[in-house]
Image (cartoon, rainbow, N blue to C red):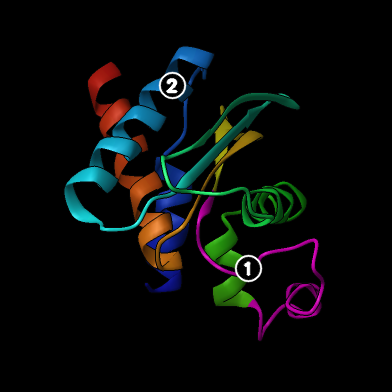
């Protein structure tokens, strides 16, 4: 993933309004994609306006700190967790997060952006971190196309 493409994703995958139903729609799309493509299972966490609206662990998936760590990374950086991974060498704060167990400097957390403001986060954990990221991005894109 190149940095330009990632920034384009963050600029284009924005909502006029994000609802709990929107979050559920995205989560169901992610689950369907995992069932089609992967032999592993994932956990999904969606937080909007400081309210946990969805926390789902597919059958066979146990609790893990990665969803919370990805959430904190997105909320503290204002960008996707993959952004912190790609910019860790350039941003000392992100580099320091690599050794901090509260953060996840890897893909799998993407900001919910409403009218240019980060209002929440969608996190996926369980696959390769780029796959986690791509599941979120594809699913948000589909929902935005559906509502356009």
Rendered view: 27 above or below 104: above
Q: Nearer the viewer, mark 1 or mark 2?
A: 2
For image coordinates 70% across by 56% down, the residue present is 69
Q: Quadrant of residue 49?
A: top right
Other-residue count near label 1 (Cα within 10 Å), few / some / many at <14 / 14–19 / ≥20:
many
What span is in magenta? 88-109
Q: Position of residue 14 (x, y in %)?
A: 46, 34
Q: Specify the farthest residue to the left.
A: 36
Quarter occupied by the C terminus = top left
Is residue 91 a member of the stretch shown in magenta? yes
The label on residue 24 is 2
Q: Residue at x 82, y 72 (%)?
A: 100
Q: Position of residue 137 (x, y in %)?
A: 37, 47
Secondary element at tag 1: helix
Label 1 or label 2, whichever comes before in sequence order:
2
SS at circle 2? helix
Which residue bears the numbered disc 1?
A: 84
């Amino acid at each position: 993933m190149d940095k330009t493409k990632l920034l384009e994703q963050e600029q284009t995958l924005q909502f006029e309004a994000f609802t709990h139903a929107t979050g559920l729609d995205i989560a169901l799309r992610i689950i369907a994609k995992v069932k089609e493509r992967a032999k592993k299972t994932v956990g999904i966490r969606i937080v909007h306006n400081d309210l946990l609206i969805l926390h789902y662990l597919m059958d066979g998936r146990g609790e893990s700190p990665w969803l919370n760590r990805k959430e904190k990374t997105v909320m503290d950086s204002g960008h996707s967790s993959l952004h912190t991974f790609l910019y860790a060498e350039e941003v000392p704060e992100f580099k320091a997060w690599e050794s901090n167990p509260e953060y996840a400097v890897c893909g799998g957390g993407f900001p919910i952006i409403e009218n240019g403001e980060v209002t929440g986060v969608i996190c996926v954990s369980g696959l390769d971190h780029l796959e986690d990221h791509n599941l979120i991005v594809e699913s948000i894109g589909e929902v935005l196309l559906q509502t356009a």
